[in-house]
Amino acid sequence: MDGIQLAPAWFGAPIPDVTGRDEAIAAGAELEELGIKSDPDSDADDSDADRDPDPYNPLSSEARKAARAATKTPRVTGGIAAIAKPIRAEYDSDDGRIIELKQQGYADVYVANKLKEEGRMRYEPKTVGSRWLRLRKLLERIENERLDDELSDWHEGEDDKLHEVCEAVEKRYVTLRENLEKKKWEDIQSHMADKLGRKKYTANACKERYDDLRAGTALLPIELDRDQAGRRKLREDRIAAAKQARADAEAEVRRVDEEKKERANQKKREQAESNQRRVAEALRKASERKERARIKQEREINRARLRDRRKAVLAMMRAEREWETARNRAEKKLYQKLTGVDIDGMPIRTRRQSKYEPEEDEAIDEFESDDEDEEEPELTDAESDEDEDQIHLNDSGSEADDEQLVQVSSRKTNKRTPRRSTRKSASKAPIIDSPNTSPITPQQETATVRIEVTEDTLINPRSIMSDNELDLLLHKRSLPKRDYAAGESHAEVVAYLAYCDSQLTTTELDNLLSRFYLKKKGKKSEKILLLQEADAKASHKGSMGLSSVDQEFIEGYGGYAEHGFEHLVQMAEEDENEEMQGVEEEYGEEVGGGRNDSIME
């Protein structure tokens, strides 16, 4: 034992004690003592000679040849034949190698193959595992004996740790002890029944009697007690107490069950009420959504009808205007033909005279065209769109006469300044605060020059854009920044952008529209309006479907009150009220009838 050295915690390989047993095994001395021949051929079974050399094999000829060739190969691949060796503390190098490999965590198969490769005992993997367990138990027992022999004193702090460990382990054995105690008294009750010939006492009765006997409080046997009446009374009381205890226990069980059932029922009721509330809320929301959808659909239908009527009225107005224009021109031609002078008393120039005086002829033609435009102002497409927007704002929903719609459109049109003929190349510049009335380019304009805010600029599609979005648009267009120090308002910036749009060429407008992947063939005013609408739709409010002509935006936009257009907000509110009132009056009966029909269905 003194020669054995174990590594701490079994993580190192032990140093075997050289006893000379390996040399004895190699010489065959131990084999001779056990009566085993050292000849390796002695491992073969003697009965092999009596066997049939070529037994019946159901396999094919090729399989039999392969099997016969496999039997001719040597069965032993290496190592020494295994022999029986006892488990000893003074183990040899083979056992030491097993201990070393197993402590390193190798599997039994790996250890067995390793022993064969190193020329040691040819152990089977199962043998390696069982031998390792026996060696480990032996070495642990030896180690425990050594520790007990060399027992040292307990050190500071170890007593507390011992108490903690004992308490932790004690908890695991409490139930085990109770079960063992119960099993013990059940065995005692069974043996008592065998002794008495019949079952008279339970395990609990045996335990109580034994405890009372040890404590000296046990009653005398019934035969030796002289107070038989008292014993009978005591027995009856005990029986009644036991029955009452059982009844109380059953009542307690029933009470607990009823409480559980009541809690479960209460939970079910609460869940049902919660489900009912959710269902009612869902039905209410669905009903509200359905009602909103119905109202929205009715409004769309009514607005579509009003748009159709507005288009019809506008078409009639255009036809009347064209007829009046044609009549005026015919009257002029007839007057010129009859009198030889125009309506202003100027002589009519012939073609030959016009060829010699082209500049004067062009001036006269331009003057005549201006007079015609002033006498017969024609609405451009932008003005027509504005008329439609105004009629849309003033939409009352009632079936008013065509004359009323004509008056509304005429009131809107008469407020505008008559525009010059579209044949002119130069457009009329807007009014600015600077005394210099000459048109200026965006590159020449400074922060001090402001564009006048008009009714048209207030309903510009860019009015819904925020300050940051307008600043970003100015930066993208390479325009001067907004003058916050001078108090430039939001509406003035929108008006300035509208003025810059009017100064752009058709090619520049096409380039700006190409940024939004838009192409427009038509007049310059149409392209400008399309560009303004594209900028508005790209904004945050525009992405939410808001436009500058919506009633909500007009009421909340501060540009109207800031620049003295409060009456437009009031007019929009009045038109909205008239529209809703007209819709109710005109289509109330029809909508009510359709609603009743849907209810009946």
Image (cartoon, grey):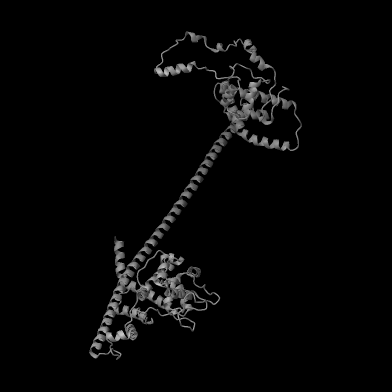
Q: Residue furthest right?
A: 153
Rendered position, 183 above or below 601: above
- The N terminus: image quadrant: top right
Can the viewer see residue 57 in this picture?
yes
> For residue 365, what is the image quadrant?
bottom left
Q: Residue at x 49, y 10 (%)?
A: 48
Q: Where's residue 207, x and y in %?
A: 61, 29
Q: Residue furthest top?
A: 50
Can the viewer see residue 401 in this picture?
no
> For residue 299, what is the image quadrant?
bottom left
Q: Seen in the image, is 151 located left or right of residue 446?
A: right
Question: Of 480 and 18, which appears nearest the observer?
Answer: 480
Q: How many marks?
A: 0
> For residue 167, what is the image quadrant?
top right
- The C terminus: image quadrant: bottom left
Question: Of 537 and 157, which appears nearest the observer?
Answer: 537
Rendered position, 576 above or below 105: below
Q: Where's residue 152, x and y in %?
A: 76, 30
Rendered position, 271 above or below 173: below
Q: Residue at x 75, y 33 (%)?
A: 154
Q: Where's residue 457, x and y in %?
A: 43, 76
Q: Where's residue 435, x and y in %?
A: 49, 84
Question: Of 526 and 170, which appears nearest the observer?
Answer: 526
Q: Seen in the image, is 91 located left or right of residue 294?
A: right
Question: Of 89 and 505, which appears nearest the observer?
Answer: 505
